[in-house]
Amino acid sequence: MLGVRSLARVAGELRRDITAARDRDPAARGVSPVEILATWPGVQALLAHRVSHALHGAGLPLLPRSITMVTRTLTGIEIHPAAAVGNGLFIDHGAGVVIGETARIGDDVTLYQGVTLGGTGFATGKRHPTVQDNVTIGSGAKLLGPITIGHGAKIGANSVVIHDVPPNSTVVGNPGHPVRVDGRRPEGPDADWVHLPDPLAEAIAGLASRISALERAVAEINSGSPSRPRAPAPALSPVAEVSPLRPVRGPNPAGG
Ligand SMILES: CC(C)(COP(=O)(O)OP(=O)(O)OC[C@H]1O[C@@H](n2cnc3c(N)ncnc32)[C@H](O)[C@@H]1OP(=O)(O)O)[C@@H](O)C(=O)NCCC(=O)NCCS
């Protein structure tokens, strides 16, 4: 049953959550713990989760899920009561964060708004990600399925990750792929993810060149048949140039 030890544990976890917010949110520097607790939705959602998780563990019906529902309404953060969350989790901004039932989160993890730790379908059993210690997950990233995100990994904003992520690596894009492992670019024949063929750009380029060929053919027909009244030749447009998007270097966007 829920007892004094559970409450003491929740209090200890809350202390670490507030410290995590002060350490990792530049906007929280110099803000008192009471103010953080009163106004940081990520910290409030975690406190509510710590309580609902303890009640869920004690076998209480209804109340844990009700706490989750109210918390989601107030903060936009939904953490299933059964999800196991380690110490020092920091959820920055919060809105749109979903953490599924069988998700496991290690210590000192940082999540930004819009992160989903979700399942891939209607599978039962372990179906949500396991996130090891010191992982940072950028805003809007979707991590789907019973995958493991290795300790110290960084997941880029808006990535969609459906495979295990090696420790100490940076994964970006959809599908998520490593662009750094232990600080170095991955090497090998399959490592050049940045210069993958772009099927949309290729299809548009193909269409553009066919239109140009048709314009030339129409112009030739019009100029070569004296019996027919000549229609003015359509102006020939040059073949449209379609270049695939390339990632652009810029200031590091990490941070709130
Ligand atoms: C993934 C991230 C942590 C990488 O930071 P980093 O370790 O400093 O790595 P870099 O900035 O050197 O980026 C490494 C490569 O990934 C690319 N990249 C970085 N973030 C990316 C993203 N979200 N989507 C696609 N590509 C990305 C970079 O262009 C770079 O490519 P290159 O090697 O071809 O030049 C960071 O870019 C990010 O997305 N942080 C999330 C921040 C966030 O959500 N903030 C919300 C605040 S409200």
Image (cartoon, rainbow, N blue to C red):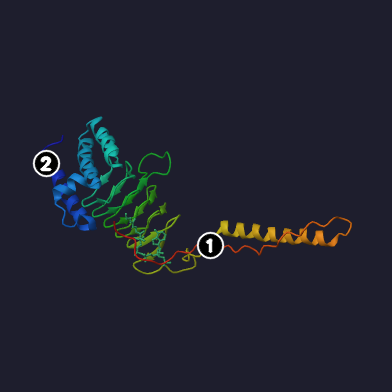
The residue wearing badge 1 is: 244
Q: Quadrant of the C terminus?
A: bottom left
Amino acid tagged 2:
Arg
- 92 sits to left or right of 38: right
- The quadrant of the rendered image in which ligand 1 is seen is bottom left
- 182 sits to left or right of 57: right
- Towards the viewer: 111 or 94: 94
Label 1 residue SS: loop
The residue wearing badge 2 is: 5
The x and y percentages for residue 65 are 27, 34
- Towards the viewer: 237 or 91: 237
Note whether residue 81 is visible. no
- Towards the viewer: 79 or 107: 79
Q: Is residue 87 above or below residue 55?
A: below
Q: Residue at position x 23%, y 58% from top?
A: 26
The x and y percentages for residue 131 are 31, 52
- Count of numbered circles on the image: 2
Q: Residue at position x 16%, y 44% from top?
A: 10
**Disc 1 to disc 2, how far (Cα)?**
58 Å
Q: Residue at position x 14%, y 41% from top?
A: 6
The x and y percentages for residue 55 are 20, 36
Amino acid tagged 1:
Pro
Q: Callout 1: 10 Å neighbours few (<14), some, many (20+)?
A: some
Note whether residue 231 is visible. yes
- 214 sits to left or right of 68: right
Label 2 residue SS: helix
- Residues under numbered marks 1 and 2 in contact, where contact means CB atoms less than 8 Å apart: no
Outermost residue on the right side: it is 227
Q: Nearer the viewer, mark 1 or mark 2?
A: 1
